[in-house]
Amino acid sequence: MQTAPMDHRLLELVERARRTTEFRLRSASGQSPSFALKDALHDEFSLFNDRRAGAVDDGTWLAQVDEVRLTELHEDAPHTQRSHTGAYVGGAMVVAGMPILRKRFVMQGSAAGTSIASKYLSQALPQKLPFRVMRTTVLGRALGRLVPYAGWALIAVDAVEMAIETIEGEEQAPRPFVGGGGRSGGAGASGSW
Amino acid sequence: MAAGELQALYEFVQQHTGRPVDSLAPATRLEGDLGLYGDDAFDFIRDFSQRFGVDLRGFDIGRHVRPEGDALSTWVLDRLLRRRRTDLTLGALAEAMARGRLASPG
């Protein structure tokens, strides 16, 4: 009955050490993964032994790790190769919808601002609609007026995705020695570090 | 302001926008009431000039209606460039018809 919780606890410690190693390797390049993992395991085991000694002195200890041998390493591809296509396309659409072109009634004097999207889409689609869309009845012009809003939407979606990934990344990063006593399941460990 | 010019202008506006003549008045604004801005306003003024022989030299449409573009970008650019626009009314257009010339103030 006592071996199962102990095995589970051991797996928890190893997993936490793995995550600590991952975090340390991300923040400090050039460190050997094997040594980093060994250090993290050493920290976790020492912590466990110290806390256990204060709570239940039943003579059960975790021996320290002599050697860590890594056989396979996986790159954290999703974080390093994230595509920002949505933001680039969205930005281009917003610019295409901005009044950066000038058109004139006469050679001098008045000039009106028009957008790339409105100019070329209304040339390509000059059909008149029987109702007003985006406050115009010209099909191409209505589509041209929608372009920057679609661009802003793409940028917003990309920004939200980036924010979610950042928050998830922070949540996955280990928080060593923070509130460690609360989840240990030890008999009356105070958890004050 | 001659009633004949106003009536001709109202009919032109009706052809262009579909708004009934009896809903128009000298105080009717091009952008605020008729919803004309950007390229639509440009086409309207160009056709108005050709139809009634109004000279547009000295008229800057950008000082009366907002250009093409989304509302957010236009709002930001207006504040950055300190642009202010004055409403263009049908009354002002009718006066321009009488003078044969439409000019922006200042």
Image: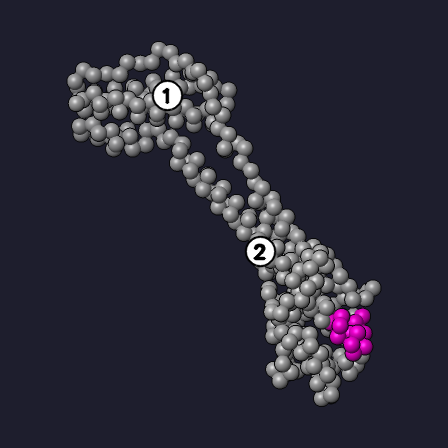
For the point 18% across and 29% down, which residue is it?
A188
- Residues tagged by mark 2 and mark 1 found on one chain of the structure: yes
Give the answer, above or below, for where A69 lies relative to A44: above
Q: Nearer the viewer, residue B17 or A171?
A: B17
Please tell me in which quadrant of the rendered image residue A43 appears: top left
Single out the mark in the foreground, 2 or 1: 2
Please tell me in which quadrant of the rendered image residue B106 appears: bottom right
Is residue A161 among the parts visible in the rendering?
yes
The picture places residue B97, in percent across and down from the top left corner, at: 77, 80
For the point 70% across and 85% down, which residue is it?
B7
Give the answer, above or below, for where A61 lies relative to A77: above
Sequence-wise first label, 2 or 1: 1
Q: Main secondary structure of the magenta part?
A: helix
Q: Which residue is mark 1?
A: A40
Q: Which residue is mark 2?
A: A149
Pinpoint the chain carrying mark 2.
A
Three-letter amino acid code at disc 1?
Ala
The picture places residue A173, in percent across and down from the top left corner, at: 40, 32
Q: Nearer the viewer, residue A183 or B85?
A: A183
Three-letter amino acid code at disc 2?
Tyr
Q: Nearer the viewer, residue A138 or A150?
A: A138
Please tell me in which quadrant of the rendered image residue B94 appears: bottom right
